[in-house]
Structure formats: structure tokens, C-alpha cells
Amino acid sequence: MARETVETHFGRKADHYDRASWVQNRELLTWAQDAIGFSAARTIVDIGGGTGVLASHLRDQNPHVNVINLDISMAMSMIASRKGLQCVVADAGLLPIGTTAADAVILRQVLHYVDCVESALAECWRILKPKGIIIVNQFVPRDKAEMAVMQIVRIFQPVRKRVLTTDQLTQQLSHAGFQGHSISKIQIDEPLYGWLERHNASSFTQRLLQGLVRCGIHAHITPLRFVITEAGIHGSASFVCLVGAKK
């Protein structure tokens, strides 16, 4: 069997991508809006923007801004284009955008998929204007146990090329020429049933995981931490939000 590429991986997910809890999370969307600041911003590039959820939010809130949704997946980009967005199909390591053309770039859940983090960040630095803003959002492990689980997930999803910690992300940004990092962390919650459905889990897998959650041993098999409430079973994961500026 041929190894799956990032493009084909997200092509398969395109039709239900908008249902992911973190993609539509209002706190994350508002955070990105506030982090950019739109008094002077005119051009924003959402790299790995998928189906354009964030790009359409930013455009709707700031009609004077040119928001470009860039993704490697044609299937994702076609859905984004139906939202009236300007879309570009390209790899994060080779951006078809002019030097110093953007006021802000965004990378949400992207850097663990790219072939080379250094190349992707170098391209961000190239297309940004002086003092332009870079925003990085990434799920990160909260402890050694979660790190181990995320590494195991990579075995089953080879398109995930690495697991990045908050310290590694800030170091990478510094080495790429970005300064003044601010860091926020947002907890993302999702119902277990929605998470399983989104990952196309079989009925057997769904019953098995639900049983393990209720037995309290789920932490060894999934990066989500589950809590049982009257409303059902909900999981949580930590999303780190970083902002830096081009030196």
C-alpha cells in the first residue's frame, strides 16, 4: 500500500473537517482575531487553512482585509472557495506569494505535518512585511504520558511527522527570526461521540473506547482526557497559541 500523503489525508477529511471541535471553536477564532489587530492589517495568509473556517471568520469581521486561504489539499480548497474565499493550493514550504506581501500569517495545526519546519517558517518570514505578525496554534502534550500517546498516534498516521512542545515551538520561531512571543493556552473540549464519528471509528472501536473511558484507563490510548458528566462523555486537549513578530 502506498504511503498516504498530507494532501490525500486531508482530501479524505475535507467533507467533515468543519465538524472538528477545534476548527470551529469560538474562543480560538476570537483569539486569532484579537491577536492580529486589524488597525493596519491589509493582507492575511492562513497557511493550512483547510476549508476556510478561520479565513471566512476574519473576512466577515473585517471586510476591508484581504484574507487568503492557502492549503495543500485541492478538496479542502474547493470547499473554502464555495465560501467566497480567495484560495491558493500550495505547500507551506514553497509559498507562491510575493516577498513582504503579508501583514500576518497563521499556522493552525500545521507544523507537525510539514516536511521541514525550518523551511515553512522561513517562507513565513519571507512573505511577511517588517514587524508582520505570525500566529501559531498547535495541540501540545501536557505531560510525558500525552507525549507518549502522541508519538504512538504517529505510527498509525505517518503524515504526522513530529510532536512539538511549547518550548520547541518558541525556539523554532526565535531561530526563524521572530521575536516578542506571547503564549496563551486554550482547552478544547469535544464530546466523545463526536470525536469517534469524526475519526470514522467502527462501532466496535466506539464501544471499546467508551468502556475504557468508564473504567478510567483511557489516558493510555488517546491524547484526549475524558470526563464523565450528566451530559455525557467529553474529552479535552491543550491548544497552545503563540504570537510573534518579524524582526
Image (tube, rainbow, N blue to C red):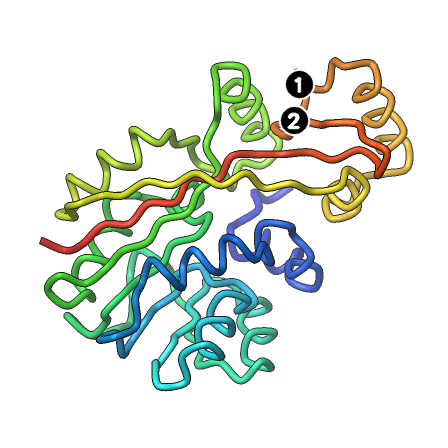
Left or right for 186, reference 41: right
Q: Amino acid at mark 2?
A: Arg
* Viewer-proximal residue among 217 and 90: 217
Q: Position of residue 55 (x, y in %)?
A: 46, 70
Q: How many marks?
A: 2
Q: Quadrant of residue 35?
A: bottom left
Residue at 90 percent of width and 37 percent of height = 203
Q: Position of residue 220 (x, y in %)?
A: 66, 16
Left or right for 13, reference 145: right
Q: Is 192 above or below relative to 146?
A: below
Judged from the image, the secondary structure of the residue bearing numbered disc 1 is helix
Between marks 1 and 2 in the image, the one whose residue lies nearer the viewer:
2
Judged from the image, the secondary structure of the residue bearing numbered disc 2 is strand
Residue at 58 percent of width and 36 percent of height = 157
Mark 2 neighbour density, 10 Å: few (under 14) some (14–19) many (20 or more): some
Q: Position of residue 110 (x, y in %)?
A: 43, 49
Q: Position of residue 100 (x, y in %)?
A: 15, 70
Left or right for 159, reference 63: right
Check contact, mark 1 vs mark 2: CB within 8 A: yes
Quote the CA–CA distance across marks 1 and 2: 6 Å
Residue at 39 percent of width and 75 percent of height = 68
Q: Quadrant of residue 19?
A: bottom right
Q: Is 187 above or below relative to 211?
A: below
Q: Amino acid at mark 1?
A: Ala
Q: Is 206 above or below relative to 10?
A: above
Mark 1 neighbour density, 10 Å: few (under 14) some (14–19) many (20 or more): some
Give the residue number, with chain letter if any, for mark 1: 219
Sequence-wise, which precedes: disc 1 or disc 2? 1
Give the residue number, with chain letter if any, for mark 2: 225
Q: Is 218 above or below relative to 33?
A: above
Left or right for 78, reference 200: left
Name of the residue lying farthest toward the front: 230
